[in-house]
Amino acid sequence: MPAERMSLTADPSRCVGAGHCVRSAPEVFDQSEDGTVVLLRAEVPESDGVLDALDLCPSLATRLG
Ligand code: SF4
């Protein structure tokens, strides 16, 4: 059965540059030169790495939807 797909948003203005998202799901998140989040893909298959990234973000900059 194919994985559910998730839509993601990332708000650089909320991001504090902690980098948890990049370490958890580097295929989905990157950081700009100033350390703030860059969303590489806005729709992805559900995965533990992406769910961890959302859970670990200290500033709620990354969200579903
Ligand atoms: S985990 Fe959150 S605060 Fe840290 S870089 Fe990613 S979006 Fe920014």
Image (tube, rainbow, N blue to C red):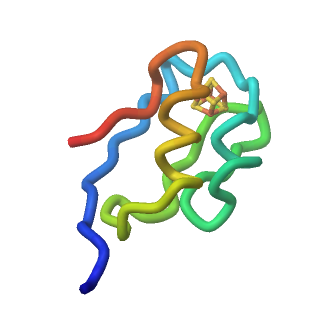
> Ligand 1 sits in which quadrant?
top right
Corner quadrant of residue 33: top right
Q: Going 36% across and 70% down the picture, which residue do you hit? A: 45
16 on left or right of 59: right
65 on left or right of 42: left
Residue 8 point in image, percent of width and height = 33, 48
Q: Going 55% across and 60% down the picture, which residue do you hit? A: 28
| Above or below 56: residue 44 | below
Seen from the viewer's position, the closer of residues 19 and 4 is 4
Corner quadrant of residue 20: top right
Q: Which quadrant does the C terminus fall into?
A: top left
Q: Going 37% across and 62% down the picture, which residue do you hit? A: 46
Q: Going 58% across and 54% down the picture, which residue do you hit? A: 49
Q: Which quadrant does the N terminus fall into?
A: bottom left
Residue 41 point in image, percent of width and height = 43, 64
Seen from the viewer's position, the closer of residues 48 and 30 is 48
Residue 21 point in image, percent of width and height = 64, 41
| Above or below 37: residue 18 | above
| Above or below 58: residue 47 | below
Seen from the viewer's position, the closer of residues 1 and 33 is 1
